[in-house]
Amino acid sequence: MGLSTHVLDTMHGCPAAGMQVELYTLQGEVTTLVKRLALNADGRTPDGPLYGDGELRSGSYRLVFDVASYFKGKGVTLPEPNFLNRVAIDFGVADPRQHYHVPLLVSPWSYSTYRGS
């Protein structure tokens, strides 16, 4: 049923509009970039799921969120080096017939994720 993500900026209490996100497939030591995009005004992918119905395959994936650039763009003064730069979430898809939703709650100093619905 596909793969989606949603990012909420917990510092400002809003969706992380404009945050850059990359999706990779992982096969052993080989990492392949599948998609690079900016989140829409709702903090979601602009054209629907990252993978739509029937496109998702069993395997390992990585989502990478460009957290530091996003917060710098919002005018947040970050130390150098900043505490969080890019947040990478590695996850597995066991049953591609199910929907996989990977939300991220993030501030410049912390993040949380879970398998959403």
Image (cartoon, helix red, strand yellow):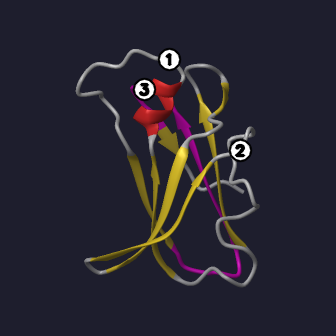
Q: Which mark is residue 40?
A: 2
Query: Within 10 angstroms of label 1, few (less than 14), some, or many (20 or more) residues?
Result: few
Is any atom of residue 39 visible in this view? yes
Q: Is residue 34 magenta?
A: no
- Element class at badge 2: loop
Query: Within 10 angstroms of label 3, few (less than 14), some, or many (20 or more) residues?
Result: many
Q: Which mark is residue 57?
A: none
Q: Which mark is residue 75?
A: 1
Q: Amino acid at mark 3?
A: Pro
Q: Amino acid at mark 1?
A: Gly
Q: Give the residue drawn at x 34%, y 38%.
A: 85
**Chain part drawn in magenta:** 93-111
Question: Which quarter of the picture shows residue 42?
Answer: top right
**Nearest to the observer: residue 3 or residue 70:** 70
Q: Give the residue drawn at x 56%, y 41%.
A: 19
- Give the distance between the C-alpha atoms of the residues marked 1 and 3, in whole angstroms: 12 Å
Q: Which mark is residue 108?
A: 3
Q: In the rendered image of this protein, does residue 10 appear above or below residue 19?
A: above
Q: Earlier in the sequence, mark 1 or mark 2?
A: 2
Is any atom of residue 107 visible in this view? no
Q: Earlier in the sequence, mark 1 or mark 3?
A: 1
- Element class at badge 3: loop
Q: In the rendered image of this protein, does residue 80 appear above or below residue 64?
A: above
- Element class at badge 1: loop
